[in-house]
Image (cartoon, rainbow, N blue to C red):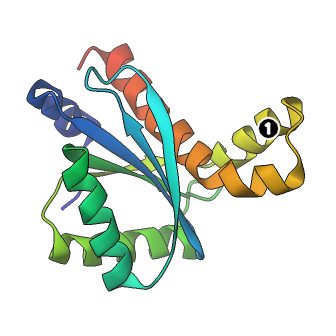
């Protein structure tokens, strides 16, 4: 079951973190909120090693940082429809719930990677460095969007 923004926001009183996830075909970018849900910080990029191994690695991080909910970037097409990538995210999250029952929120991430890439180009990062950090930066951009939406709505 996927949570709404209001349902995810209701977890804030637990004083635990949210984790942002940018799920790619080869890597998984991760970011973490602070305990006050004010700022998202890029954490790391995991190599995607299949559902079971990736899920177990995510669970270790969730437990280590006391994460109470996950925000997955949900790549909706520009026309609002769901494409193959959004179906992959939905499939991964549904299978992940078999490993750990945790609140999951899907956030429209249409422009996250583009925005992050532009920021890195502006910051004059080399292409090699961009490739190293783009996934965790995108996860941070996704999570920050949710944190800002929660704050804006005063949920």
Q: Identify the residue shown where x is 17% and y is 77%.
A: 98
Quarter placement of the C terminus: top left
Relative to residue 95, is residue 22 depicted above or below?
Answer: above
Relative to residue 112, is residue 145 depicted above or below?
Answer: above
Which sits in the foreground, 142 or 30? 30
Which sits in the foreground, 88 or 35? 35
Relative to residue 11, is residue 82 depicted above or below?
Answer: below
Tell how many labels: 1
Taking the view exactly as shown, the residue that stands out farthest to the front is 64
Which sits in the foreground, 78 or 18? 18
Circle 1 crowding by C-alpha within 10 Å: few under 14, some 14–19, many from 20: some
Instruction: Read off the residue under disc 1.
Output: 120
Which x, y percent locates residue 83? 57, 71
Which x, y percent locates residue 124? 90, 34
Q: Identify the residue shown where x is 25% and y is 43%.
A: 4
Left or right of 70? Residue 50 is: right
Left or right of 143? Residue 98 is: left
Q: Identify the residue shown where x is 47% and y is 75%.
A: 88
Quarter placement of the N terminus: bottom left
Q: Identify the residue shown where x is 14% and y is 34%.
A: 11
Left or right of 135? Residue 37 is: left
Q: Is residue 14 visible?
A: yes
Q: Dot 1 lies on which element?
A: helix
Q: Is residue 83 visible?
A: no
Residue 52 sits in quarter: bottom left
Which x, y percent locates residue 57? 33, 69
């Amino acid at each position: 079951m996927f949570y709404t923004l209001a349902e995810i926001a209701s977890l804030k009183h637990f004083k635990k973190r949210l984790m942002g996830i940018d799920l790619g075909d080869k890597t998984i970018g991760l970011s973490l909120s602070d305990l006050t849900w004010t700022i998202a910080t890029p954490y790391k990029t995991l190599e995607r090693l299949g559902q079971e191994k990736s899920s177990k690695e995510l669970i270790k991080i969730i437990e280590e940082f006391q994460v109470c909910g996950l925000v997955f970037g949900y790549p909706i097409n520009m026309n609002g429809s769901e494409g193959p990538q959004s179906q992959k995210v939905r499939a991964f999250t549904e299978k992940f719930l078999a490993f750990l029952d945790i609140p999951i929120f899907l956030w429209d991430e249409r422009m996250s990677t583009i925005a992050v890439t532009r920021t890195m180009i502006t910051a004059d990062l080399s292409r090699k460095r961009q490739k190293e950090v783009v996934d965790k930066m995108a996860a941070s951009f996704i999570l920050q969007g949710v944190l800002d939406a929660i704050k804006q709505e005063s949920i």
